[in-house]
Amino acid sequence: MAGGRLPNPITIGALGMSAFLNPLLYSALESFGPSANTVVVLAVLLGILPVLRALQKACWTICPKVVVTDSDDFFESISEWSSESGVLANARDIQVRSPKKHLTELQVHPCTFTATSTVDDGLPFNFTTVQSRAKFRVELFNASTWILEKGSAICIKRSERSVPTDGGVAKSHESYEFTCLSLSPKTILQLFERIRVQQSLRHEGFTTVRRNVLRYDHMWVKAARRPCRSLGSVVLDQKTKLHVAEDMNKFFRMDIAQSYARRGIQYHRGYKFFGPPGSGKSSFAFALAGLFRVDLYILSLSDPTLTDSGLLTLVCALPDRCILLVEDVDAFEMTRSRTLPQRLDHTPAPASHLTLSGVLNAMDGNATHEGHILILTTNHPERLDSALDRAGRIDQHIQFQHADRSQMLDAFLLAYTHDDAVLNDEPITIEQACQSIVDTPSRVSNIPGKTMEELVQMAKEFTSKFCEHKHSVAAIQNYLGMKNTPEKALKDVDELATVSVSSESAVQRL
């Protein structure tokens, strides 16, 4: 496919008509004087141009058009494809977006970052050397361009318009319009399928995270695209990981969906992850999204513009298979137990237009979406209203705790080893994905001169310095993440040993 502008076919027809009429006009004008020639030519042109415009408009109206709005996920795919494929090389009206100032979408597998990287050379980290590898993103800007797809000319037009909202504030609304010079949209649809396949392959191994925003309506937008996190990298009890992963895998199967439909039961499943801060609740949800290759939708109930109807709009806009994550659900007044006389922490509740009835209807009302998994996380399950916990809304209650010795062992080995099976993208079963680090045979050392057996012995020495269930998994991982070698982690272990559950703020000193 070649990108660039093609002459409008109607214009080509007009030129051909002019070539046919010119000899006749010249012969007719020979009998007139030079002064009359100009008058006659202008009269002819003024008579022909409206006819040509009408002919062009008539032909343009019968050409098939396909529109993709920015409320659809495919809008972003088209923008990425047009920027990377070179179809805008000859476009005249474009906009340029600067490279992003973060590393979340670098096409580098996370396992390639090892503890052997040189970071203690005494020089400050220069992010410019990394950022210089990123390229500008080129997009159409309220303009159109032509491409040739399988012998058919297609006009791609990107337009923007303002749409008033209920609050009276105009919001920007963008769309792509594809027009094919044929009588069937088949060529456009084939192009869309090719774009979809290309973008799917390009993003294989990545998890897309989306969040809710208010534009001209409440909608989901991409917040980040990050490498899939393996379940092995989540420091959590093996039985808990296996139980939840197998339960979700069973739910996603098509025969289960058909079973729900036959029995007239709404096809969705809910989980409540509860436990102290830093115990891995949100990390586990992200890893599960990567395991099943579904998008993670993070819903913020603290959005002051979110109403009951807006929440239902967001839930109904979810795809057939995804994970909907609502974090710290106990922090919102509408979800707290109605038997509590006041907030236990005596802090003001976030401003919100949501009601408990609206939240419950969005979870399992008659108009709600089916096919998704809902995960609620909370640090204080006792504060939640009992209506949120009833069967059918929350099907599994999963408790998280501070690290025990096996979790400390896994955290230490996770910092200084990598999994060859994950690095080579080898297929593994759910049971293999949920194995503890020490029991994973494909795990190899990142440290030159250190074998896995030696690292296991060092990990056991590390765990002997602590009492069980006294330190959060996040505190241990943050500590190990700043230690380049296992020897240094053992040497400075007193830094972490002094951190208690009642003094989590001390983690900031690490």
Image: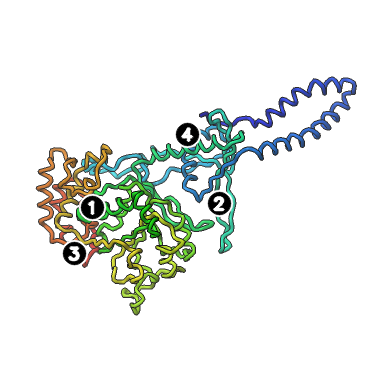
Residue type beneath disc 2:
His
Give the secondary structure at mark 2. Answer: strand
C-alpha span from label 2 to label 4: 24 Å
Which x, y percent locates residue 362?
43, 63
Q: Quadrant of residue 381?
A: bottom left
Mark sitting earlier along the chain (1/3): 1
The answer to whether 325 is drawn above or below residue 446 in the figure is below
Residue type beneath disc 3:
Ser
Residue type beneath disc 4:
Ser
C-alpha span from label 1 to label 2: 44 Å
Q: Quadrant of residue 325?
A: bottom left
Residue corresponding to mark 1: 242
C-alpha span from label 1 to label 3: 29 Å
Mark sitting earlier along the chain (3/2): 2
Callouts 3 and 2 close, C-beta under 8 Å? no
The C terminus - image quarter = bottom left
Residue corresponding to mark 4: 85
- In-front residue for pair 497/461: 461
Q: Of the residues tagged 1 and 3, which is closer to the observer?
A: 1
Rate crowding at label 3 as few (under 14), some (14 to 19) or many (20 or more) other CA atoms within 10 Å. some
C-alpha span from label 1 to label 4: 42 Å
Which x, y percent locates residue 149?
53, 31
Rate crowding at label 2 as few (under 14), some (14 to 19) or many (20 or more) other CA atoms within 10 Å. some
